[in-house]
Image (cartoon, rainbow, N blue to C red):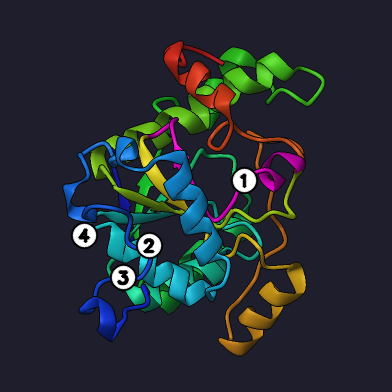
Amino acid sequence: MIKSEQAFESSADNGGKSVLEPQGSASSQSSTGGLEFFTAEEVARLNDQLRGMSPIEITRWAIGQGDGRAIVSTNFRPYEAVVLHLCATVQPTIPVLWVDHGYNRVATYRHAEQLRQMLGLEIRSYLPRISAAHRDAISGPVPTTEDEQGLKAFSAVMKLEPFQRGMRELAPKVWITALRKVQNPNRAGLDILTLDRNFGALKVSPVFYLSDSEMEAYLAEHKLPNEWDYFDPAKADEKRECGLHAAWGAEALGKGASAA
């Protein structure tokens, strides 16, 4: 049901504990995700090990680290079915955070509903505090890439603020995403595991190193649908970031996202 707001590998020698467990216990992490618990060296070590694991093993490990507080986010763009299927396979009731900014295409809404029914997704939909029609009437058309500041302001109001609200309410320790290295230059500098300072969570991307052909193969193997009729107005271009995974997103949220 869409709700709107208006493996880890184990070893016998380890007594069943995750071989990727950081020093200490995941359950000792704070309510902000325990980012202070992971050092840069620890993250680098974990990434070295995670790169040798399959996406489903990474997903099991990530959800295990969440200690009951893992979520997956989605925008129902192409290939999102892969990470949603991975998460639903490991934890069928995992919350799915979706910001419905009001500018989605008809095909995106139909794809979302198809996947909801097929995978039994527990979608938590968060909407901006102002509707798309209201925003356009006041501020005019959605900014283009020629107006970088205007586009960032648009994203802050229509995407970042509702996402931040969702993260505060769901309060995850672990945030699973469909980020991939091949998507844009900014993401090429990330890795499977990162400490997300924008939203205070351990961010895990199980499909980070998968190619398009590998994603296609996964879809085919599991008979999952894909949808190419998609556009994100907060990015305007696939080589840009909307702010969720970029440092400027925190700055935009800090300004209060007052208007676009």
Judge the density around disc 3: few (<14), some (14-19), many (≥20) Cα neighbours within 10 Å.
Answer: some
Camera-nearest residue between 183 and 31: 31
x 52%, y 18%: residue: 252
Secondary structure category for the residue under label 1: loop
- Which comes before the other along the chain, label 4 or label 1? 4
Total marks placed: 4
Judge the density around disc 2: few (<14), some (14-19), many (≥20) Cα neighbours within 10 Å.
Answer: many
x 57%, y 13%: residue: 138
- Which comes before the other along the chain, label 3 or label 1? 3
Secondary structure category for the residue under label 4: loop
Residue occupied by mark 4: 68
Camera-nearest residue between 23 and 249: 23
Can residue 11 be seen here? The reply is yes
Secondary structure category for the residue under label 2: helix
Q: Amino acid at mark 3?
A: Ser
Residue occupied by mark 3: 18
Q: Which residues are magenta?
A: 185-199
Judge the density around disc 1: few (<14), some (14-19), many (≥20) Cα neighbours within 10 Å.
Answer: some
Q: Identify the mark at residue 190; answer none if there is no mark.
A: 1
Determine if the magenta segment contains residue 14: no
